[in-house]
Image: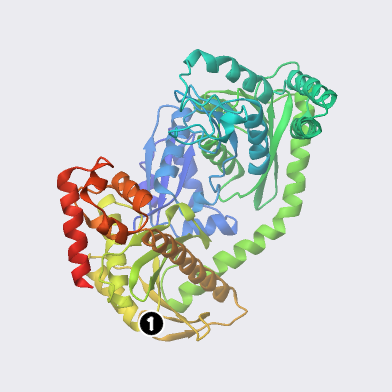
Amino acid sequence: MKEKLVDVPKRPGVYLMKDDQGRTHYVGKAKNLKSRLSSYFTGSHDYKTQKMVTATADFDYIVTLTEIEALILELDLIKKEQPRYNVLLTDDKTYPYIEITTERHPKLRVTRNVKNKKNRHIYGPFPDVRAARETLRILNKLYPLRKCQRLPGEACLYWHLGQCLAPCINTIEKERYEPIKKKIDRFLRGHTKEIVTELEEKMAAASDKLQFERAQEYKDTIEAIKKTTGARQSVNLKDATSRDVVGIAEDEEFLALTFLFVRNGKISATDKRLLDKEASAQDALGQYLGQFYRNNPIPREILIDGIEDGAALAAALETNVHIPKRGVKRRLLDMAKENAQATLKNERLKTKELKARTFGALEELAEELDIPTPYRIEAFDNAHLFGSHATSAVVVFVNGRPHNELYRKFKLKAAASSSDSALLEEAVYRRYRRLLMEEGELPDLILVDGGIQQMQTTKEVLSALGLSIPVAGMVKSQDHKTHHLLDSSHNTIALAKTGRLFRLLSRIQEEAHRFATEYHKKIRGKGLFESVLDDIEGVGPKTKKKLLSTFKTVKAIRAAEDESLRALGIPEKTIKNIKLHLEEKDKDR
């Protein structure tokens, strides 16, 4: 690598640190690639940086024209490669927002998916999903947009309550929605005085007519509005520009961030993060903010202090990045920094303990199995009821923590009488054949729920696919709790019941069982509604619904006259198929 460093140019760009298997485990950017890369291989470093450098067997780099291009490319590569030393920066957290959909007949909904927000009416963020849903409940009560996911064939209760225009039965012109949307927009921007006054007038009128229940409803709605909108802290700014205020604090190990989300002159939500600095605070900060704003709406202005490449960040995010020196904005930033200091102080010990439990357990697992540290673990479990509705599931743990978005489930095609090993064989084959086809990331370790037979089955499937991935078995005790581990040579590894490795493996095994069982219950639940009618040519969901609604039972359908079936609009050919199929089923009995 020292020889390779000679040819590295003194230009801006992105570098990729790789392990001995050619996998990228860190991505960074630099104003001067030669200087930055050379710094890793000379002098002393802190523990975490030294660990990363020790694990580095090679590096690549990409030269860019500007630092801005380097930042954008760095973020793209982190998203694509998911390097383990970068992944620690963010858990892709998103916040709840309220959206007025752009459908022909719009509705209100709570959403976290705000990546593509062009031409969308999105408001927030809200401090938590409970606050967002409570606000949504109030809005749905006040404004008659549709509530249903799909338009039904008849008006529902909301129409009768005056809370929906009922486009399912009425012709509603597009223009009629505009004033409603404007009122919702004003409400969500904090202008609630008009609606409160209107509700107070309605409450007084209802009281005068002795309609006390109606008056109480208006009063409850008024109080809910005041509680929901009054909980936000006002900020004495002269405009309603959306701003994020980012406070920073750091020590030798961690970087703490506090976000204040200022919307319409009020702090609508706050958040705190404690990041592992890894290579440097500036690298961690730039990478985190870049990743954060890929998952959350970018405000008109970001107030921040202590960042070196503010101009590059502003250009990459296409927004204003400002370091205020005085006034209200400076006081806001100081408040955010004070909160960041508190986060650093209060969360530091807890975070260190969490890392010791997760990474410490992974290193202990690697030592017991005599394999490289398994930063990515996949675990399988099967579920069935006496062989019926067989399912399997795989859960994925990265850096000792579950990543739900990577979980996968399988409705197995194997025969109901198949053994657990046969069911596992199908699941493992389908999982890794697909990963190979899609060039997806493979695990460092596969855990199977069971003993030698299940392990052997898994190894044979992997071998057939040309894969060499370590496999271990998680064996349960008689009370179905994690008991011990089997290594690749089928040696028993005892687990101390109070140890961190036992806790990690128990969590993985329980999570795999939970996920497989939940999916199995769902499939089994659907099976309860299966009918012999499902196998008849020409009988789809609508025809099946007509038959069961009219005749209630299959026995009554079998006894029905052809004329009764014709009256439901069922074609002659389908009637013949129904009769023939049910007669054959009757003979089988």
Q: Is residue 89 rendered to the left or right of residue 194?
A: left
Inspect this view and state whether residue 431 appears: no
Tell me where residue 184 appears, x and y as whole percent: 63, 22
SS at mark 1 in the image:
loop
Q: Which of the two residues, 277 or 301, is positioned nearer the viewer here?
A: 301
> Coloured how?
rainbow
Q: Which of the two residues, 19 or 447, is positioned nearer the viewer here?
A: 447
Q: Is residue 585 above or below residue 270?
A: below
- Looking at the image, which residue is at 19% across and 56% down? 579
Q: Which residue is mark 1?
A: 451
- Looking at the image, which residue is at 80% across and 34% down? 216
Q: Is residue 287 rendered to the left or right of residue 241?
A: left
- Looking at the image, which residue is at 20% across and 47% down? 538
Q: Which of the two residues, 108 or 514, is positioned nearer the viewer here?
A: 108
Tell me where residue 136 appears, x and y as whole percent: 63, 34
The C terminus lies in which quarter of the figure?
Answer: bottom left
Tell me where residue 304 appears, x and y as whole percent: 67, 31
Tell me where residue 360 appears, x and y as whole percent: 57, 68
Amino acid, disc 1: Gly
Inspect this view and state whether residue 41 appears: yes
Q: Is residue 351 rendered to the left or right of residue 526?
A: right
